[in-house]
Image (cartoon, grey):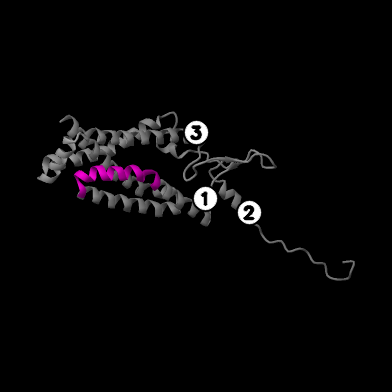
Amino acid sequence: SPTGLPSQQPHIFPSSSAAKASNLLEGRGADGIPLKSDYDSMAPAPQSLFVLYTNFFLVFSMFGVAAGAGLFYFTESPLMHKKIEIVKEFGMGPLYIALFFLKFVFQMINANMGTARRETRVNNPDQHIYRVYGGASDGSIVLMDLEGAHGRFNRGQRALANLEEYLPLFLVNFAFVGFVAPTLVAVITVLFGLARLKGAIAYVESAKDRTSGNLASFLMMGLIDGMALFIGVVTTFL
């Protein structure tokens, strides 16, 4: 050293940024978008998501039709039969059928969204794709942060939003079908809530972990959907 003092070299701390970036891009392209769509395991293109969603909706609903028929034809419930007659007397049967149809339309709109989502390969919990306009990062894609506490918050928020999407129609069904079969609908509602809670807690940790809880809640919704259809048909056509 010209000063006669020992030269001091800057201390370089090991950086994990490159390794971290590599982990974040695992399974993704250079633009950050996943290489595969979650739909590829269920209905890869060009299979129709409209058919897939219709099949799920009808299968789950048939459990509700069976439950309604079992209560109506094979149990001694004078009160339920009296309420069925009230629905029939006031000509309310078509409302139950229309409610079932509206739920089917809701599923078809979901299938429409899913078809567009599948093409982008952007999976849940991401709901939007943002891009940077202008500047050095012009054209870059911006997606949801899925790492650490930020990721857990984003997935937890998405679980809440997903419940809010389904809750309005569920509550309408709750009122309509609950008038005829209040005890069964109360049980279904409690199970629906517990299933959604299980799915939400699991979703915070991983998007894939939400599946079992959400599927159980879809079955509960299918029970009420099918019962609405049964009540509508019985009181309108029989």
x, y percent for residue 229: 24, 36
**Discs 1, 2 touching: Cβ within 8 Å:** no
Q: Is residue 178 left or right of residue 4?
A: left
Q: Identify the residue at the far front of this view.
A: 90
Q: Residue at x 52, y 41 (%)?
A: 128
SS label for mark 3: helix
* Residue that carries the numbered disc 2 in the rendered image: 17
User: In the image, what residue type sits under mark 1?
Assistant: Leu
> Is residue 77 something one can see in this rendering?
no
Q: Is residue 172 magenta?
A: yes
Q: Position of residue 179 (x, y in %)?
A: 21, 45
Quadrant into which the N terminus falls: bottom right
The residue nearer to you, when weighing 71 against 17, is 71
Residue depicted at 80% across the width and 66% down the height: 8
C-alpha span from label 1 to label 3: 21 Å
**Residue type of the residue flagged with mark 2:** Ser
For the residues labelled 1 and 2, the Cα–Cα distance comes to 17 Å
Please rate how many residues cluster around mark 3, counting C-alpha atoms within 10 Å: few if below 14, some from 14 to 19, many from 20: few
